[in-house]
Image (cartoon, grey):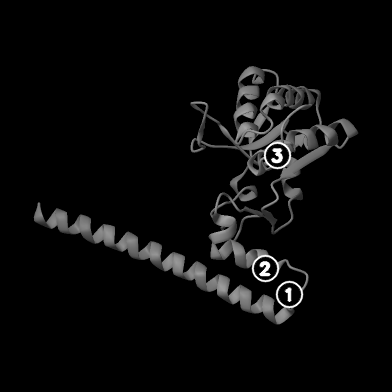
């Protein structure tokens, strides 16, 4: 391997793309279920409830129509959380994914793009189900099991940052209560703002109706 990792961006992309190697290693080791989470994921609740869903398929992953184009092509999946059941089909899929991504291991979004291409070539031989949004929630709903710090949200979103603070070992009980109250405040503000926008839109429509 003569890949140049001198640039910071290349090293960061490599660190994101080697998820496929980690998944393959655990599958080959014989683990029955493998669930990959990005480092910015906050696991807030019991995730074992995903196993019954995973037992019906080979892979669970979130589909999307909003990823950034790579080489003029949009990826069809979000790879921040990937759940795999150890089957022949899953292992063959991951092996193909690794073959495709290896020449592009230092390219951003290669994990998503080549997962999509692997799926396109293997869709008849592997079952890929939809990962419930509660396990890859980047809107930070209270009932969700996993929050992910997608994009700049990990550094800029107050609700995410407060939740992250709750899990720091050095946090005292009183500090946790204060953080919970602040988080409730931000949620309330978001709800009120949404209600305000809704009422404004309704008022504008009513005015146009009266004028008409």
Structural crowding at the residue carrying mark 1, measured as other residues with C-alpha within 10 Å and reported as few (<14), some (14–19) or many (≥20): few
Q: How many marks?
A: 3
Quarter holding residue 166: bottom right
Q: Secondary structure at mark 2?
A: helix
Q: Is residue 83 visible?
A: yes
The earlier-in-sequence mark between 3 and 1 is 3
Secondary-structure class at tag 3: loop
On the image, the x and y values in percent for residue 93 come to 73, 24
Check if mark 3's residue and mark 1's residue have beta carbons within 8 Å: no
Specify which label sits upstream in the sequence, 2 or 1.
2
Instruction: Check disc 2 and report the residue beneath it.
Output: 165
Label located before the other in sequence (2 or 3)? 3
CB within 8 Å, label 2 to label 1? yes
SS of the residue at dot 1? loop
Query: For the residue carrying disc 3, how many other residues have a C-alpha within 10 Å: few (<14), some (14-19), or many (20+)?
Result: few
Task: Please give the name of the residue rendered at 68% of the width and 36% of the height, measured from the top-left corner.
Answer: 60
Marks 3/1: CA–CA distance:
37 Å
Measured in 3D between alpha carbons, the distance from the residue under mark 2 to the one under mark 3, in whole angstroms, is 33 Å
Pinpoint residue 21: horizontal percent, then vertical percent. Answer: 78, 33
Lateral position of residue 31 relative to residue 95, left or right: right
Image vertical order of residue 40 relative to residue 168, above or below: above
Nearest the eye: 177 or 56: 177
Residue 180 % position (x, y): 62, 73
Label 1, on which residue?
A: 171
Work out whether residue 66 or residue 199 is closer to the camera in this orientation and state it: 66
Question: Furthest residue to the bottom?
Answer: 174
From the image, tell me which residue sits under label 3. 6
**Residue for point 64% across, 65% down:** 163
> Residue at 52% across / 37% down in the picture?
67
């Amino acid at each position: 391997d003569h890949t140049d990792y001198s640039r910071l961006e290349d090293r960061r992309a490599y660190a994101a793309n080697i998820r496929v190697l980690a998944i393959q290693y655990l599958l080959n080791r014989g683990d029955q279920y493998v669930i990959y989470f990005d480092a910015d994921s906050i696991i807030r609740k019991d995730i074992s409830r995903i196993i019954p869903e995973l037992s019906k398929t080979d892979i669970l992953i979130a589909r999307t129509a909003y990823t950034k184009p790579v080489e003029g092509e949009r990826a069809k999946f979000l790879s921040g959380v990937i759940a795999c059941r150890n089957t022949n089909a899953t292992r063959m899929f991951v092996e193909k994914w690794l073959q495709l991504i290896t020449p592009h291991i230092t390219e951003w979004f290669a994990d998503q793009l080549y997962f999509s291409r692997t799926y396109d070539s293997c869709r008849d031989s592997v079952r890929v189900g939809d990962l419930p949004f509660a396990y890859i929630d980047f809107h930070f709903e209270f009932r969700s099991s996993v929050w992910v710090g997608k994009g700049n949200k990990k550094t800029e979103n107050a609700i995410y940052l407060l939740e992250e603070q709750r899990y720091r070992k050095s946090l005292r009980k009183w500090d946790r209560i204060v953080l919970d109250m602040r988080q409730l405040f931000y949620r309330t503000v978001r709800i009120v703002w949404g209600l305000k926008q809704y009422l404004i839109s309704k008022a504008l429509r009513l005015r146009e109706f009266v004028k008409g």
